[in-house]
Amino acid sequence: MGFGLLLLSFLLVLPTIQADTSTVYVIPIEDEVERGLQAFIERGIEEAEDAGAEAIIFEIDTPGGFVDAADGIARLLDKTDLETLAFVNQDALSAGAFLALHNDEIYMHPNGRMGAAQVINQSGNAAADKANSAWLSSMKSAAQTVDRDPQYALAMADASIDLPEVGAAKGKLLTLDAKEAEQVGYSEGTVSSLSELLALKGFQDATIVTIDETFSESLARFLTNPFIVPILLSFAGLGLLLELFTPGVGVPGFIGMVFLLLFFYGHLVAGLAGYESIILLIIGFGLLVAEFIIPGGVAGFLGVAAILGSILLAGGDLKTTAIAVLIAMVVATVGMVIVVKFFGKRLSLFKRIILTDATDTASGYVSTTNRPELVGKIARTLTALRPSGTIQLDDERIDAVSEGRFIDSGKNVKIIKVEGSRIVVRELDKQEEE
């Protein structure tokens, strides 16, 4: 009976023990912030929510990235009901600082840095006032959402703000170290490791689940990078152009299709493209094939339009994708000209479109000789000249043209001009014949 009571007590305590075991998810935010990273973080948050996790720790070490991607990730962080913690493990710069501010709490490594969040364009210069104003508003809102003083967030993005007490003199963007961030309320504490942070938050006995990128997600992040997209589309365009002008070869077209499929694969895995863009792409290629069967140009034009539409639809951000398409079109056209001009005669696939034979003197070809000695001679028309025809001079038949008037056959004519192979004649009047 004593054993039965002991067993019953253990069974009653067991659910309590199990209930005290919490789950914490760790999601890394590393390298550049771009659209592919957004899909990875979205998957991690969904897994944590489905598992009923108590908190998510975002381990941040990034030099920044693209504003549109950072904005999309920030929306994901704001949307989740789970507690979110940012562990700045070295760098949270630019877009990384923006993402850190969208967490409920921030903790920093002793060597961590957070700030330098000014918007720059693709040329490396400060963005236009309109874009910069919108970004400043976003930085301010991110700080205010978790009751942080917004002036420090603004100083990270605006060099005109003067905060010398934290190293942000006028003309210099603010970058906080771990000690400064804690002093101004932008960090809840400084920890040297993830395990120290877990212990500080009381999660030392929690089940830790680290979300790692799959190979397909890593590849998608690379393929959807705004600097890689124009390269993919340029090679795709060049390959398809070469195939268009050298039909039947197959190799350029195959290479072009591979690069085009890589573009769509990356955007599909990253969650930027839907199957509607793939359907539009298939329709486009179907119309191009139909152009070979139904000539006229309409099917071909619609096919090209459908393919371009599918690319723009798959790209996610219309402006960025449109710029990439324009770059690709220019690069593909210039590449086509260079390849044909400098390598056309050396590559066998261009023999279909480039004439390499020459009718030169060394090969036995002789151009038409000028015969000025014929001027003034009298010949007879073998055919009517309307105005061209044939005359006979002695025993030689010669192609000639009249001076302008119709000359019937069997008439005497005088050669009045010789211009290379062009021999001009005039009909003799009665006085000249006498």
Image (tube, grey):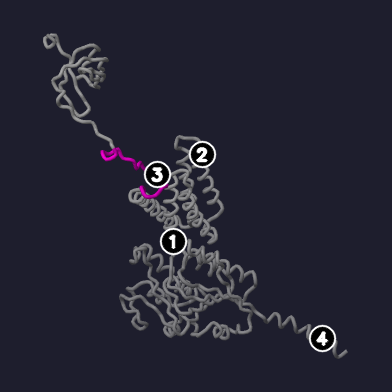
**Helix, strand or loop status at disc 4:** helix
The residue at the point 82 percent across, 86 percent down is: 7
The N terminus: image quadrant: bottom right
Instruction: Give the alpha-carbon distance from disc 1 to disc 4, as whole Å.
Output: 64 Å
Tell us which disc is closer to us: 4 or 3: 3
Give the dominant element type of the magenta stretch: helix, strand or loop.
Answer: loop
Tell us which disc is closer to us: 1 or 4: 1
Q: As drawn, is 162 to the left or to the right of 14?
A: left
- Residue 351 has which mark? 3
Residue, far right: 1
Q: Are marks 4 and 3 in contact (CB under 8 Å)?
A: no
347 or 189, which is in the foreground?
Answer: 347
376 or 301, which is in the foreground?
Answer: 376
Up-down: is 181 above or below 131?
Answer: below
Task: Name which of mark 2 and mark 1 comes first in the sequence.
Answer: 1
- Residue 290 has which mark? 2
- Residue 7 has which mark? 4
Q: Which residue is mark 1?
A: 228
Q: Are marks 2 and 1 in contact (CB under 8 Å)?
A: no
Identify the amino acid type marked 3. Lys
The residue at the point 37 percent across, 52 percent down is: 335
Residue 10 at what x, y percent from top left? Answer: 78, 85
**Count of all numbered marks drawn on residues in the image:** 4
Task: Name which of mark 3 and mark 2 comes first in the sequence.
Answer: 2
**Helix, strand or loop status at disc 3:** loop
The C terminus: image quadrant: top left
Task: Name which of mark 1 and mark 4 comes first in the sequence.
Answer: 4
What residue span does the magenta drawing correspond to? 344-363
Identify the amino acid type marked 4. Leu
Q: Are marks 4 and 2 in contact (CB under 8 Å)?
A: no
> Residue 139, can we see it?
no
